[in-house]
Image (cartoon, rainbow, N blue to C red):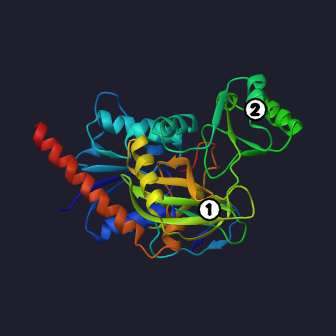
């Protein structure tokens, strides 16, 4: 568990957490980026950019 | 053989997690390279890239993908997909030109640089027709134009509000597809798996919520996939086809292809097949180095 940087609610994390992964806060809906795993640290994820995609 | 694999990314999606898991399970050493934290020197590779056998470009941002692949090629580090492939697939104009040149059936397309000539192109196609951004993905900013007044409004908005790329007007015929299109994942033209993406909406991208199901490719589709892959320089590609009667048209080829929806839809272990291919590419690159050394 860690805290949502947007709303402060607890965010549950899965075991195979990966730096760079995006976690959704189930309370406020914010997209959070995993910037560290030991211990888990979350930051607000970047906003969608126009050239993102496949 | 254990490989040192660089994975170029800015966001780890389920696609990248599938690849990372497969690579690690095979005991390959993976170096995750977050492009946002990296600088690229024009004369020498950063020390972090020492020993990499191959780099997989999984950049989310097309602009970064285009430059990063060029740097890895300049450093002599094999990168998939190649810059050539990225450059063609990243831009819909390049993509269409390459398909047309290779004789791959693709929707009729015109490009114009002003609102007035774009309007001429639209009028030539008639209504409906389609206006797409030259760079973009996930079905964003695509416009199905149903009338002259809609065309005028969209062109005005693009010319006024968009940056310079939106002043390159990419106009395409509207293809009456049967409520679905086909996504084929292929490595150097060899299909790994395929799925249909179905939706009531005219845009049938999985990213837009289309329903997916497995699709069996016939000989014609397999041949088109091979030809389309060759047209853009090969690599790990997502090739999109639409059915027209009993034939197909290829509307685009994607170079940093997402495959999580496909992995869910088909029985094939997509990540495992991609890693098989990556191992082969790394081996081939190593052999080439030995020959030239």
Number of residues whose C-alpha sits closer than 10 Å to that of mark 1, classed few (under 14), some (14–19) or many (20 or more) = many
Q: In the rendering, at what x and y percent does residue A26 appear?
A: 68, 72
B146 sits to left or right of B17: right
In the picture of the structure, the residue carrying the numbered disc 2 is B124
Q: Badge 1 is on which residue?
A: B206
Q: Could you tell me which residue is drawn at 23 percent across and 58 percent down?
A: B3
What subunit carries mark 2?
B
Residue A1, given in percent of the width and then of the height, sits at 56, 75
Left/right of residue B45 with respect to residue B225 in the rendered view:
left
Name the mark nearer the viewer: 2 or 1. Answer: 2
User: Relative to B159, does residue B236 appear above or below in the rendering?
Assistant: below
Please give the name of the residue rendered at 66% of the width and 51% of the height, measured from the top-left corner.
B139
Q: Which residue occupies the foreground of this view, B27 or B292? A: B292
Examine the rendered structure and indicate whether residue B98 appears above or below residue B14. above
Up-down relation of residue B245 to residue A17 (above or below): above
Residue A33 visible from this viewpoint? no
Q: Quadrant of the N terminus of chain B?
A: bottom left
User: In percent of the image, x 57 and y 44: which residue is there?
Assistant: B106
Say which label, 2 or 1, has the lower sequence index: 2
Q: CA distance from mark 2 to mark 1?
A: 31 Å
Choose top left, top right, bottom left or bottom right for residue B83.
top left
Figure quadrant of residue B191:
bottom left
């Amino acid at each position: 568990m860690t805290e949502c940087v947007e709303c402060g609610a607890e965010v549950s994390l899965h075991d195979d957490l990966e730096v760079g992964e995006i976690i959704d806060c189930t309370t406020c809906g914010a997209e959070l980026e995993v910037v560290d795993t030991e211990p888990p640290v979350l930051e607000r994820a970047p906003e969608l950019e126009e050239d993102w995609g496949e | 053989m254990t490989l040192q694999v660089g994975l170029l990314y800015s966001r780890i999606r389920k696609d990248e997690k599938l690849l990372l898991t497969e690579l690690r399970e095979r005991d390959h050493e993976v170096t995750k390279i977050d492009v946002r934290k990296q600088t690229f020197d024009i004369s020498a590779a950063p020390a972090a890239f020492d020993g990499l056998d191959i780099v997989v470009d999984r950049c989310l941002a097309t602009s970064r993908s285009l430059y990063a692949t060029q740097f890895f090629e300049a450093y002599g580090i094999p990168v998939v997909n190649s810059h050539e492939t990225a450059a063609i697939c990243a831009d819909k104009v390049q993509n269409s030109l390459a398909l047309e040149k290779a004789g791959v059936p693709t929707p009729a397309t015109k490009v114009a640089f002003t609102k007035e000539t774009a309007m001429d192109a639209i009028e030539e196609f008639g209504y409906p027709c389609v206006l797409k951004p030259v760079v973009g993905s996930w079905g964003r900013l695509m416009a199905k134009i149903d009338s002259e007044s809609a065309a005028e409004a969209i062109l005005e908005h693009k010319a006024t509000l968009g940056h310079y790329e939106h002043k390159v007007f990419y106009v395409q015929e509207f293809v009456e597809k049967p409520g679905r299109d086909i996504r084929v994942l292929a490595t150097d033209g060899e299909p790994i798996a395929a799925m249909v993406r179905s939706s009531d909406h005219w845009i049938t991208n999985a990213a837009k919520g289309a329903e997916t199901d497995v699709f069996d490719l016939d000989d014609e589709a397999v041949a088109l996939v091979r030809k389309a892959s060759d047209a853009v320089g090969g690599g790990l590609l997502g090739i999109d086809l639409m059915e027209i009667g009993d034939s197909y048209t290829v509307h685009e080829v994607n170079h940093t292809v997402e495959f999580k929806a496909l992995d869910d839809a088909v029985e094939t272990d997509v990540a495992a097949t991609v890693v098989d291919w990556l191992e082969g590419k790394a081996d081939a690159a190593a052999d080439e180095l030995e020959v030239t050394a």
